[in-house]
Amino acid sequence: MTAVFWEYYPNGWAQVICGGGKSPAERAATDRLNRTIAGTVIPDEVPELRSPATFGYLPDGFAVTKVAFVEKVDQPGDIMQVIAQKRSPGAKTREITLWLEWPRSGVTDQGEHLVVDGRPARLEGQAYLRVWYAAYDLQLSAEDAGLADPRAELLKIKAGMELAAPQDRSSWPTSAIGI
């Protein structure tokens, strides 16, 4: 996989990532494609960034730092990823990750059975929460967050979250953060 990253606006970063290939020639062709795509992006103002999820609560020190939309190439559907990080000088960056995936991947029987917002949910281990909606899955991970009680924090994060329909991009509220 190859990627091109660039600062298109002060503190505003963009990326183009395409799968590479196994041979050097395939990777070089993908790199040329990435650079061609990147060269066509000329923003004249800060672009509006939208996300289907907003957080009413994050643990102390955490802030949303990334929103990424990934189109699945090997199967129908898409994934939206939102990452919140806690950065401390001289310490490991801690991370909480939200994935919204559609269509749903199906209910599993692993983990503690819960009901969250009236929906079936599973807490897998102490730091991974899955909630199933009619047309999509919500997955919330605090496995690398360094939280004293990840189970309680995940449930607080989910309780404070507002979700728009991930399949309907026009319903997504504007996000105040950049990639």
Image (spheres, rainbow, N blue to C red):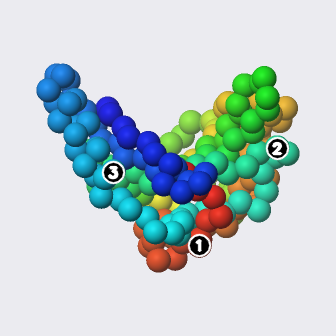
- In primary-sequence order, the first of circles 3 and 2 is 3
User: Looking at the image, do the residues carrying marks 3 and 2 touch, with CB atoms under 8 Å apart?
Assistant: no
Q: Of the residues shown, which amino acid type is indicated by label 1?
A: Pro
Label 2: state its secondary structure: loop
Q: Residue at x 61, y 51 (%)?
A: 11
Q: Which mark is residue 173?
A: 1
Residue 101 is left or right of residue 10, and the answer is left
In this view, the mark in front (1 or 3): 3
User: Looking at the image, do the residues carrying marks 2 and 1 touch, with CB atoms under 8 Å apart?
Assistant: no
On the question of residue 72 being in view, the answer is yes
Q: Which mark is residue 38?
A: 3
Cα distance in 3D space between marks 1 and 3: 26 Å
Give x and y (percent) for residue 26: 16, 30
Q: Of the residues shown, which amino acid type is indicated by label 2?
A: Gly
Give x and y (percent) for residue 137: 51, 54
| Residue at the spot of label 2 | 61
Label 2 environment density (alpha carbons within 10 Å; few <14, some 14–19, many ≥20)? few
In this view, the mark in front (3 or 2): 3
Cα distance in 3D space between marks 2 and 1: 23 Å
